[in-house]
Image: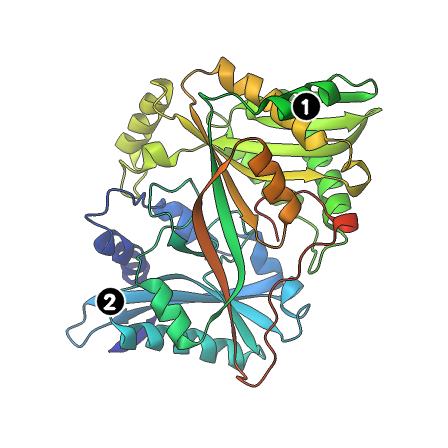
Amino acid sequence: MNIIEVVSKSQKQSFLDIARTLYKNDPNFACPLDGEINGIFDPKENSFFKHGEAIRWILTDDTGKVIGRIAAFINTNKAYSYDQPTGGCGFFECVEDKDAAFILFDTAKSWLKERGMEAMDGPVNFGENDNHWGLLVDGFMPQGFGMPYHKKYYQAFFESYGFKVFFEQYSYHLDRTKPFPERFWKIAEWIAKKPGFDFEHFKFSDSEKYIQDIIEVYNEAWKFHDNFTPIDIEDIRKIAREGKGVLEEEFIWFAYHEGKPIGFFVAMPDINQILIKMNGKLDFWNKLKFFYLLKRKTITRARITIMGVVPKYQRFGIESAIFWHMDKAIKAKKQYTEVELSWVGDFNPKMISIYESVGGVRMKKHHTYRYLFDPKAPFKRTPIIPLENRGTKASKE
């Protein structure tokens, strides 16, 4: 077997194609867009290159056939905030061959060790953790956009190599054809109408205002958390630009107290319900097909990616009030019958409680693993977020 760094155009294509090959007959797999994956490894596209580096490889057998892939990366904003300097590996795909998998893991480990790292998280993304984060270990069903889908045998590869569970990630599903529990509904409506509190949804016509509101709430809500790093405003602007025509304004909500932003909520249409038909390609004809299917209201599921409420207001039931508004917005768009609440970590019991209080059913589980290069070093799981410092959140560390 031969490990090859991905540099050339053909190697980049092979890195993408191995996933298409492995999941060819799996009806649950929605191939990520080629442009999206390539963009993660492009310094011109990915702002994380401002404070990090990344590399990727493919693995071939003795005949030259590609049988696996992996990437490794270092986010210097977070790498040194742990007990051991920690990098990451991700985008792992492999045939059912333990030796091949271990070659891929060894390659990522060696590259990270050469750069001073003492631990490796995986499978993770060289970007924010709302996308391509964690290994699917339970709930092998169609995945929400950005949520990874994997082969069942990958779990044994990671754990036999020596990776240990750093935290578990849960995805809940809401059947919007069923009403919220009555007790929740009464509390939410009361909060939503309380004097001094206002709620409004995102508008593209005033996008910069709402982007600034997200930054303000994010920095206040998460500054007490371990390994906090400010969000890059350009990343938010990019999402807003690229999402025009796809994002539903009424699915992104903000809470204000006396005019000051205190919370936000982001849900988006699950475009995987269309992308599953495109095999990762967004050429001219597929673009036409995408917008045709979008107008035909093919998408019936939304995915909640993040919620944030500043700690001072967390006992006011702001999250409930935002859900109250969201429910009305979804009911107004009758094609949406399901909401995926993903993901929430096992370290965030408050968010788990909120998801369950609205009737969410736990459907999927992903593992984020950590591998310590020194087997004698003490392993610590992600600590539970202290209640007094807890910024409500879904898919954020």
Left or right of 57 on screen, residue 118: right
Judge the density around disc 1: few (<14), some (14-19), many (≥20) Cα neighbours within 10 Å: many
Q: Point out the frontmost of discs 1 and 2.
A: 1
Quadrant in the picture for residue 214: top right
Q: Residue furthest front?
A: 183
Q: Return the mark for residue 96.
A: 2
Secondary structure at numbered mark 2: loop
Q: Return the mark for residue 362.
A: none
First in residue order: circle 1 vs circle 2: 2
Left or right of 114 on screen, residue 271: left
For mark 1, what is the residue? 188
On the image, the x and y values in percent for residue 89 come to 46, 66
Amino acid type, residue under disc 1 in the picture: Ala
Residue at image location 33% in from the left, 30% down from the top: 287
**In front: 123, or 11?**
123
Secondary structure at numbered mark 1: helix
On the image, the x and y values in percent for residue 351 come to 63, 43
Quadrant in the picture for residue 263: top right
Judge the density around disc 2: few (<14), some (14-19), many (≥20) Cα neighbours within 10 Å: some
Residue at image location 17% in from the left, 77% down from the top: 62
Amino acid type, residue under disc 2 in the picture: Glu
Residue 89 visible? The answer is yes
Coloring scheme used: rainbow
In the rendered image of this protein, does residue 10 appear above or below residue 310? below
Residue at image location 39% in from the left, 25% down from the top: 300
